[in-house]
Amino acid sequence: ITESSGLATDPAGSLYWTVNDSGDRGVAYGIGLDGTVQGTLNFRAQPRDVEAVAVHEDRLYVADIGDNGGQRDFVRVYFFTNPRANGLTVTYHAYDFSYPDGPHNAEALLVNESGRLFVVTKEREAAIYEAPAKPDREGVNELEKVGSAPSNVTDGTFLPGGERIALLTYSSVEVIDATSYEVVVSAPIPDQPQAESLTLSLDQTS
C-alpha cells in the first residue's frame, strides 16, 4: 500500500479495505485490526484512477472516479459480492456513471443504509451526486446533483442511523446533514501530508 486513497469498514470480514491511488492494478487490500495487510482481492481490470472504497452489507465497491484533467466521459464503480482478502483473482461487476453537467474530479464514494450510491466531487465548488436507485450494468447511468459539498473532499462515510455524513478534507472532518447537505459540525484533523482515508471503526462507535 503506497498511497491509501480510501478506507471502508467490513464488519462481516472483521477487517478494513483500502485501495491505492492511480497507478495500481485491479486490487483492494484487506487490513486487520493490528494494521497489517491480511491479503488482497484481485480483479482483471485496469482502473484509471481509483479514489475510494465502500462496503454495504455483503458488497464491496471500488470507485474509479478520479479525473484530475476533467476529461472522462464516464467513471466506473466496480463491485464484488462477499469479498475475501485471500489473494485470489475474482470476477467483477461494474456500473458506469456520467455527470449531467460535464466531467468532474471526485475522491469520495458514499453508500447509504439502503445501498444508494453517492459521489462527492473535489472541486472548490464541490457537489454531491446521487446515483439511480437501481443502476443499470448496461450503458452509462446519469448521476443527479442533489446538493453542495465542502471543498477538497477526499473521502467520506454515512454515520450510523443514516442522518449524517462525515466527509474528510485535507485539513478537517466535516459532518453534514444527509438531507439538507449543510455542515452541522466541523473539526480539524492532525497535520499529515495528504489525508485521503476515513471510515468508521468496526464496532461503529468511533
Image: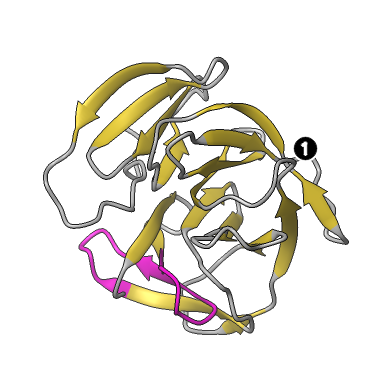
State the quadrant of the C terminus. top left
Magenta highlight on residue 59: no
Residue 11 in the image: state x and y as whole percent.
44, 49
Number of numbered callouts drawn: 1
- Apparent side of residue 112 relative to residue 76 in the rendered image (left or right): left
In this orientation, does residue 206 appear?
no
Determine the residue positioned at 46% across, 17% down. 182
The part of the chain drawn in magenta is 19-37
Vertical relation: 179 (above or below) 54 = above
Vertical relation: 28 (above or below) 6 = below
- The front one of 11 and 29 is 29
Tag 1 residue: 133
Magenta highlight on residue 28: yes
Vertical relation: 53 (above or below) 85 = above
Q: Three-letter amino acid code at disc 1?
A: Ala
Determine the residue positioned at 67% across, 62% down. 76
- The front one of 171 and 30 is 171
Instruction: Report crowding for label 1: few under 14, some 14 to 19, many 20 or more residues within 10 A (C-alpha).
Output: few
